Image (spheres, rainbow, N blue to C red):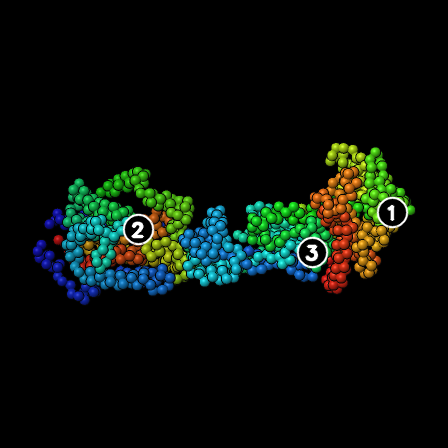
Amino acid sequence: MYQHTRLTTNRLGFFQKFKNFDYVLLICILLLGFISLATMYSTDGGEIKFHTKSHFTKLAVFTLMMLVMSFINIKYWFSIGYLAYLAVVGLLVGTYLFGITSSGSQRWINLYFINLQPSELMKIFIIVCLAKFFHRMKLENVNSIYTILTSLIIILLPMGLVIVQPDLGTAVLIAISGIAVLWFAGINYRYFIYTILGFIISLPFVIAFLKPYQKLRVLTFLNPDKDPLGAGYQIIQSKIAVGSGGIFGKGFLKGTQSYLEFLPEKHTDFIFTLFSEEFGFVGSAILLVIYAIIIYRIVAIGASSRSYFAKIFCYSFGAAIFVFITINMSMVLGLLPIVGSPLPIMSYGGSSMLATMIGFGIVMSARVHNQQLIA
Amino acid sequence: MINSSSDNVKKLNSINRRMFITGSLKFFIMIGIVSRLFFLQVKENKKYLTLSDKNRIREWKLAPVRGEFHDYFGNVIAGNFEAYQLHVIPEQVEDFRYVIYRLKDLLELSDNEFKKVLKKKNEIKPWETLIVSDNLSWQKFSKINNHLYDLNGVKPVISISRNYPFKENFTHLIGYVSQANPDDIESNEAIKKNFVPGLKVGKVGLEKTFEEKLIGTNDIERYEVNAYGRRISQLEFQKGEKGKTLKLTIDTEVQKLANELLKDKAGSICVMDIYTGAVIAMHSSPSFDPNLFVFGISQDDWQLIRNDPMKPLVNKTLQGNYSPGSTIKPIVALSALENGIINTNFTVKCTGKTEMYGQTYHCWKDKGHGYVSLRNAMKQSCDTYFYEIARKLGVDKLSETAKKFGLGEKVFGDLFDIEKKGLIPNTQWKKNALGKGWLLGETIITGIGQGYIQTTPIQLCLMTAQIANGGYKIYPHIVVNDKFKDQPMDKFTPLYKNSKNIKIVQDAIFGSTNEVMGTSYRSRIDNPEYQFAGKTGTAQVKKITEEERELDLKTSQIPYEQRDHALYVAFGPYKNPRYALSVIVEHGGNGSTTAAPMATKLFKLIIDRHKIRESLGNKKYLEI
């Protein structure tokens, strides 16, 4: 066993690691970065202004960070799993205590050099933490009460901290990230089915407990035309923008809906709307294909990884990214109620991009060190 | 070790199975999103494209330019000028209070005006235009333009507005425009279609009648606007059409003289071409300045006009029902001749009064005229003679002739909705309207134009014109080339049975003006070029009691409301008549002293103007 370990921990040289890179994934990420920059340029009205500059800086720094991360052995990421989780929980507590309040919710914490949104980071680190938790667990223990309770606590603790901010949307996304891990770890199907059934049954009661603005969002989703200038405005304008794009779009920098400021939140949650208006069905489909390739590569890397940790992380991260994309797009296309959820990489926002890039970094590290076993 | 590896295999199997399920799920969800995109962007594209355009394109309608009124010689009698206005759309202003107080300072609005603006703001919907000021001076307008940078949402507008350069001269004829009210919009399709806030529409007179022709069509500006309604760029400017300019048959010079003659008097003057029916002048006095109404009349001005005892708001030419007095005598004489009741040799002895059916009927001349024939009776306006022939004629035959000559019905048809019909009584009418039988005494006073009989000044003018032109039917009109209503086929049909009778009456009227003892002899013009023939009339407004008759008061000694109306109808030049006129001065006393001298002045001008009119007409005047 000792020998075995030594055999597999043979150190890879710098160039070998380079060779092991998943270049398809890297190119897709860079392409996505480029598209997001171009879109940001369009939101700035065809000028290089604050959002474009800031987005570019973040993109450059975080891509570099991702590359650095991929050179660090996957074992290391495994070892810091719990610590990172606890650190982010600590940040969430810090946010609760001294966070910065903006537009009615306390989501940001001032770290002197950056204003961070820890809830975004939690979307990734909850996967790292739970992946580590299930790494060594025997399959017969997975469905034990202890395991289920512990994993539920791991999920509910940050969720609670995010809900009080209040930020229901991100809390739900954190839960989805966690649940994805539970799913791949092999928790009994029945629990998922029961949970879904229980959720559906309790939905009316949950709605009764929602805050008025959240209730309004749900009602608006069901019938946006009821209050076209108020609550329904965002979704109606978003659909108009997407729909008016047509097959080939209105052309770069020519999206009237965004240019004339009919689009709300066009830098962040509704960035896809702007993109879709300017590049049409064809552009949107291409963007979706890029995302699909990224997710496919993440899953493929997971499949080729020898360690269970890497595998479960990649699968869960792939699923989580997929859900983030799906929720964001469904929201702007009027398929889901408006929940604050950014489109990975495309949306403006440092914390979201940092979290996504950390995820990509770990995936890339798993790829580079795919032969690495973790005891 | 073996256990652990078999567990690993199981774990791997589990995770890979679940990955497969997840993968398939992802695939279907992706398909779902793509099909949603397809639905929105390809299938429903048109709908959303329209919605997007609706979002970004906004239309502004501008007030159409109203057509003008020109007189026969091309003078503008109702035109347009550029008014500087200030519009605000409350919805588009971020901080309405700030903007409105800023405007108050800049425009130096009084507290009262300011309150009015605020009140107006509360009455309109937030997306409707609030007109803060509708007629700014150039100084204030440019001041606002200099401060536009901090008056977000304020729109300086140059608007075309109505102007009546001749002020009170044409008020009753043309009418005036004023801001359209909800009733105007409801009742007129053209106004509804072209409505913009602040649109002025015709309220009375020809301005109202020809609204559809005058109104024109809106200019339309299309702008690209952003989500806050701010204009980003102009996409299109669609020029509207100016309303049609209407040329009238009116001669401004004559109209002005009419206004001058009736200054400070209540009454009416109208002048008509006896062949074409073209109205040369038509004035009702007192008048008022229609410009006052264009931007809304002030309460003080309105009260002044409304409470004037001479009733400036009444168009006396069309609405005034007057007893024709002696001006009816040509018709009575004509009717008697036509019906063979009398001939030129028929004489009556006038002793100043006559007893009939137990009542005493007085001639205006206490001493009487002695034996009078038709010509003398007309000349001296002997009442006794006309009592006698009216008695012999009967009211029904008289009313038949009177109606033939245009009395008792609207002269302009539906051109003016205010026009009155007057009243030509007969036995049938009295039975129907009053339920009583006709009394012979009533016939007798009808013979001198008193009693039930009522006529409007324009009717008297038409009657005179039709006698003057030899007894042929004409249709008076005011608008040149008026396709609005084509002139009927029965134009110029003879109204007489024997044209000699018309000649007799014409000659009698000639005597009345141009021979010694004639009632309007003092107003005659000897120069044959201007010589005219006319008949005076003095209409009592109340019954004269025996005591009053004894007193024989002068006009100035009688209270204003009880004085007689002075009337005069005439045509000229006598040798070759072309124009007829009627003059009425309310409570003016005697026709021969008050009304007839006006005709003298009028004929001098009318006949001078006729040459100019003819020279113009040779080129253009084809409107018969």
Q: CA distance from mark 2 to mark 1?
A: 103 Å
Please tell me which residue is depicted at 22% across the width and 49% down the height of the picture: A96
Q: Position of residue A263 (x, y in %)?
A: 38, 54
Kind of residue indicated by mark 2: Ser
Please tell me which residue is depicted at 76% across the width and 34% down the height of the picture: B431
Q: Badge 3 is on which residue?
A: B260
Which residue is farthest front? B551
Give SS at disc 3: helix
Task: Tell me which chain the residue with mark 1 is part of.
Answer: B
* Circle 1 Cα neighbour tier, 10 Å, few/some/many (<14 / 14–19 / ≥20): many
- Looking at marks 3 and 1 on the same chain, the residue that comes earlier in the sequence is marked by 3
Is A297 positioned to the left or the right of B74 in the image? left
Q: Are marks 3 and 2 on the same chain?
A: no
Specify the quadrant of the image occupied by residue A366.
bottom left
Q: Position of residue B71 (x, y in %)?
A: 68, 59
Looking at the rendered structure, which numbered label has been put on residue A103?
2
Q: CA distance from mark 3 to mark 1?
A: 36 Å
Kind of residue indicated by mark 1: Leu
Task: Tell me which chain the residue with mark 2 is part of.
Answer: A
Kind of residue indicated by mark 3: Glu
